[in-house]
Amino acid sequence: MRQLSFQAISDKKGKDGSNVENILEMLYDLPREKIHGQDAPFVRTARIKSENMELLTASMTDEQKDLLDAYLDARSKVEGMMDFDRFRFAFHFGAQLMAELIKGKEDVL
């Protein structure tokens, strides 16, 4: 797994050229290098999805394909936003839990 030094992270630039200031965005955007084996449920499901998409698009007109592409792009953006919201909630929850454990609150768990 590729490690990023603090310097590399702190020098990272945002899309507008400014320094990225949200540590949660940096953590969320770090490379994920989990490799799924060929027999993994993820790989089987991805293969089925791909095969079904090929069957579906084979029967579509170019206009229908364009409309489907636009729909899938919008869906992907919405899912990305929702994934980041879940990540941010889980991170904040974990940080709050750790803070309470460090303070010594016995009734946390």
Image (cartoon, grey):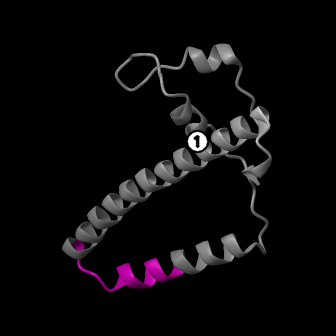
> In x, y percent, where is residue 1?
78, 38
Seen in the image, is 84 located left or right of residue 38? left
Magenta residues, dominant SS class: helix
The amino acid marked with disc number 1 is His
Closer to us: 62 or 23: 23
Q: Which stretch did the figure color magenta?
A: 51-62
Query: Against 43, is 105 above or below?
Result: above
| Helix, strand or loop under label 1 | helix
Q: Nearer the viewer, residue 39 or 25?
A: 25
The C terminus, quarter of image:
bottom right
Magenta includes 56? yes
Residue at 41% of width from left, 51% of height from top?
A: 81
Residue identifier under label 1: 92
* Residue 109 against residue 50 in the figure, above or below: above
As rendered, which of 44 and 91 lies closer to the eye?
91
Q: Position of residue 98 (x, y in %)?
A: 73, 39
Residue 96: percent from left, percent from top: 64, 40
Q: Is 1 placed left or right of 76 in the picture?
A: right
Vertical placement of residue 83 versus 105, above or below: below
